[in-house]
Amino acid sequence: MDYNAQLKLQAFLDGELSEAEASEVADLVARDRETAALREELRNTGRALAAFEGGIQLPESREFFWSKVQREIQRLEAPAPKFAPAPLFARWRRLLVPASAFALVFVAAVALIQPVGQAGRTSAADVETALADAGAFTYRDYSAGTTLVWLTYPADNEVAESDEMGTVE
Amino acid sequence: MKLQAFLLWGTDDNKPPEGKAYKPVEPDVLLKLKDLPLKWTSWFEVNRKDFSLAQGETKEVPISEKCKLNLTRYVRHEVEVTLIGKGKEVMKRKQSLPKGEMLVLGGNAPNSTAWLVVLKRLE
């Protein structure tokens, strides 16, 4: 017996077929032993289910049960609450606190870190120069480790004419 | 602290003046001079002094008849250098001078030449 025939038989037992179809199925049940056996089985199953379903009862009243369902639906459908905008001060504080911390770390790093390539070299803080020569200047070659102090000494009026090197030698 | 002090003469000629037994400048010193903003193309060594300076010590180093250096060594690499020319203090400078570094003092000399006093630390 195919599946569609089985469905038709179930519908016959449920009283859902037209007169013509019900007549066909009744004839088939009378002629065919397999169909008759299936009919009996379906009838017995139906009776058992009806008896089982009859014993189930809700522990609460019907109205109370449905009011709970209704409340849950309303809760799920309620719109999301709008957040009130934070006060201006609070918003600025959220930005300023991390910015201040970063600035503090940056200043500390600049103060503590030595310039690259100048470890052990002369730094401005280590140098004191007293010049009687107002026209003098200083040049520092950090890569070579050389400091040049160029003086206007000897002054031209101190140069001895016979000296090849002025007054230094 | 071991130091060398040189008196150098700079010129655009490729030889020293007649009668002057100037020597060629040491290659490593010459190399550093070339990196300085000095226009002269040739340098010659007029005089050289090698000396040591202990911590806390002050030493007078004559460079020429008219010129001398007064040096004082302080803690670590610090030295104070005073250039005295014809009895007058021309310049005083206190700085750190680590090993291998140089302090170069210089000025113009007659006939478009130049003089340098180079203080180099060896040890």
Image (cartoon, coloured by chain):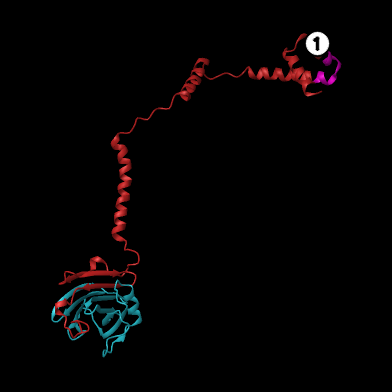
Instruction: Give the side of residue A161 with respect to residue A100, left or right.
Output: left
Can you tell which quarter of the image residue B115 is in?
Answer: bottom left
**Split into 4 quadrants, where in the image is the N terminus of chain B?**
bottom left
Q: How many marks?
A: 1
Q: Is residue B9 left or right of residue A68?
A: left
In which quadrant of the rendered view does residue B9 lie? bottom left
| Residue A34 forms part of the magenta stretch | yes
Q: Is residue A71 above or below residue A141?
A: above
Identified at 32% across, 54% down, the residue is: A106
Camera-side residue of B49 and A53? B49
User: Residue B116: where, in percent of width, then height?
Assistant: 25, 79
Which chain has been coloured cyan in this picture?
Answer: B
Image quarter in which the C terminus of chain B is found: bottom left
Kind of residue at badge 1: Ser
Nearer to us in this view, A12 or B57: B57
Q: Position of residue A38 (x, y in %)?
A: 79, 20
Q: Which residue is mark 1?
A: A23
Type of secondary structure dominating the magenta stretch: helix
Residue B53 occupies quadrant: bottom left
The answer to whether residue A18 is left or right of residue B100 is right
10 Å neighbourhood of mark 1: few (<14), some, or many (≥20)? few
Q: The residue tagged with tag 1: helix, strand or loop?
A: helix
Return the residue found at the far top: A19
Q: Where's residue B85, x and y in %?
A: 16, 80
Frontmost residue, B42 versus A141 = B42
Membership of A20 in magenta stretch: no
**Residue, x 44% and y 25% (percent of image)?**
A79
Q: Chain of mark 1?
A: A
> Residue A128, can we see it?
yes
Question: What shade has chain A been given?
Answer: red
User: What span is in magenta?
Assistant: A26-37
Residue A148 pos. (x, y %): 26, 73
